Amino acid sequence: MSPHLNLPNRVTLVEVSPRDGLQSESYFVPTDKKIALIERLVSVGVKRIEATSFVSPKWVPQLADAEQVVAGITRYSDLVGFQGLVLNQKGYERVRHLGLIREIALVVAASESVNHRNSNMTVGESMSQLTRIVRTAKADGIRVRGTIGVAFVCPYEGRIPLERTLNLTGMFVESGCDEVALADTIGQAMPDHVYELFSRVRERWPDIAVAGHFHDARQLALTNIFAAMQAGVGTFDCSVGGLGGCQFTKGAPGNVATEQVVYMLSEMGIDTGINYSRLLDVAEFALDLTRPRIPRSSI
């Protein structure tokens, strides 16, 4: 590794395929297959996994089996930090009664257009709700990640002003979030933009944990991860097989593929703790989950 590059020795990867990767699939992935995916991810060394989301089945029917999935992975609770997406107080109440999920993810978009489509609330209303949930979660001993959706570019409003994302980051920090993730939800961010925004965040809040969440619309996700690492970021979301996308955000492509990230980092001498060769088999398994089987009787 060049001594002139500001790169970490180790990077933490948060695997989001069980939730973000599968949520938009029209074909319902059986619960046992979702559990099997998580088991395989654990077996190759993944230590943080977004297991599911606790949202209304009306809006995300793919993840209507959240409680059943959690019940199936309880035995891994000492090996992995499991995360669940929560959009409101009702969803949080589902989490707190389970016990296994010790980290929740809360999302507020940087644009009013996307935020209203995601939650039917203004950004201000979402932040007020988020603050109340954070307060309850912290009292319950649950770690909180706040994710800023479309932190770089909005499909409806264009490039998001840096100060808007920075102000929202400050609100997340003040609310008590343990970690703030900046998401390039539609995969339109450029490396210089990524470097500048993350550098400003690290400068203002040097003690807060920061993560990057990149989608790969223009095959720039790996480049953007490199730019974010140069700015001091050491945690990134990824999805095995490149699965993912948000049905509520126009133009949201798949997440950056975990196997691509692990390969790039390992070749650069950066440790992830994940076995690359075995991860390739997990990627194939994950992709196979999105290919619905045609019953023989219908052929």
Image: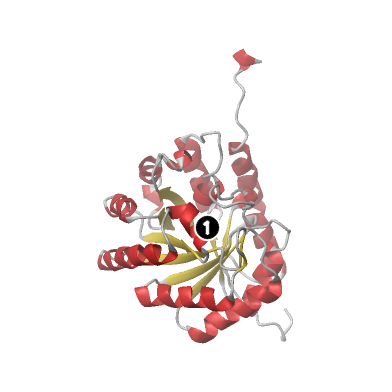
Is residue 174 depicted above or below 64 in this figure? below
Q: Position of residue 198 (x, y in %)?
A: 58, 77
On the question of residue 50 being in view, the answer is: no
Q: Quadrant of residue 297?
A: top right
Q: Amino acid at mark 1?
A: Val
Side of 14 relative to 141 (left or right) = right
Q: Could you tell me how many numbered marks the image carries?
A: 1
Residue at left 65%, top 55%? 257
Colour pattern of the rendering? secondary structure
Residue at left 58%, top 77%? 162
Mark 1 residue crowding within 10 angstroms, few (<14) / some (14–19) / many (20+): many
Residue at left 69%, top 56%? 217
Residue at left 58%, top 70%? 11
Side of 214 relative to 49 (left or right) = right
Is residue 162 depicted above or below 149 in this figure? below
Q: Position of residue 112 (x, y in %)?
A: 50, 62
On the question of residue 226 being in view, the answer is: yes
* Near-viewer residue (254 or 89): 89
